[in-house]
Amino acid sequence: MVTKAEARRITERRGRPSVAEAAEKRHAIVRAAIDLFLRSGYKEVSIRQIAQLADVSTRTVFNMFKGKEGLLHACLQAISQDQDQPVLIEQATLLDTLETFAANMLRALSRPEGLGFAQLVMRDGRDMPELAGAGHASQDQQFVQPLATYLRRHLARRAEAEALAKIYISMAIAEWNRSVTFLLPLPDEQQCAHHAAHVASIFAKAIDAN
């Protein structure tokens, strides 16, 4: 005879989604959240709206992401992983690597979802610290830390690697940031390549001189 406890465990096992089903639900939730955040803004979107679009329960969303802020981090991570190629690709020389990194970073930031979230953070981040914090954490993970790790391996000034990485990134995205801030056309592919080569040359010469 099956006890009540055993029956409950059997029911729970039957109701528990497989790994593949859970991954599919997670993907649907993240894509729904990205769509809604970009269309309506972070503040205006509720967990209920996201759950409805993803065709899951609100409980499922909370169980997977612990709330809207956790889901926001997952969205930013998904956007960075959807890039066509890694942002940092090591080349034969420091100069070539820096130039490729800057060009790839500008491409990543200019893609519709990357650009959309950057504009969202710029617009609403001041009033919503969790939004600004998520944007900062995403940039740190996607751009700053990989470049800092590379610089530590290739420069004698290892203690300054993270500070140097932040300086270089600021230089690399200066024109992109200006375009986004003042609602100007984004740099095209040729302009991105030219700007990347220019800032890589300036930065490489500066760190060589010191």
Image (cartoon, rainbow, N blue to C red):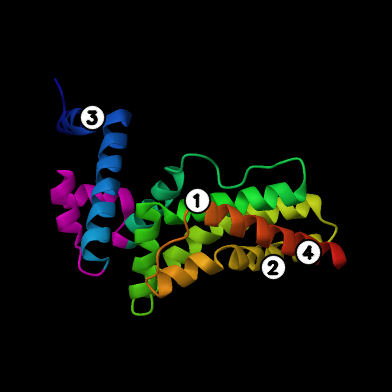
The residue labelled by disc 3 is: 13
> Is 76 included in the stretch rendered in magenta?
no
Q: Is mark 4 on a helix, strand or loop?
A: helix
Residue at the image position 80 percent from the left and 51 percent from the top: 154
Mark 3 and mark 2: Cα distance apart in space? 50 Å
Mark 4 and mark 3: Cα distance apart in space? 52 Å
Mark 1 Cα shell of 10 Å, populated few (<14), some (14-19), many (≥20): few
Mark 1 and mark 2: Cα distance apart in space? 28 Å
Q: Which span is picked out in magenta?
A: 43-68
Which quadrant would the C terminus be assigned to in this image? bottom right
Query: Which is nearer the N-term, disc 1 or disc 3?
Result: 3
Q: Quadrant of residue 143?
A: bottom right
- Amino acid type shown at disc 2: Ala
Query: Which is nearer the N-term, disc 4 or disc 1?
Result: 4
- Amino acid type shown at disc 4: Ala
Q: Is mark 1 on a helix, strand or loop?
A: helix
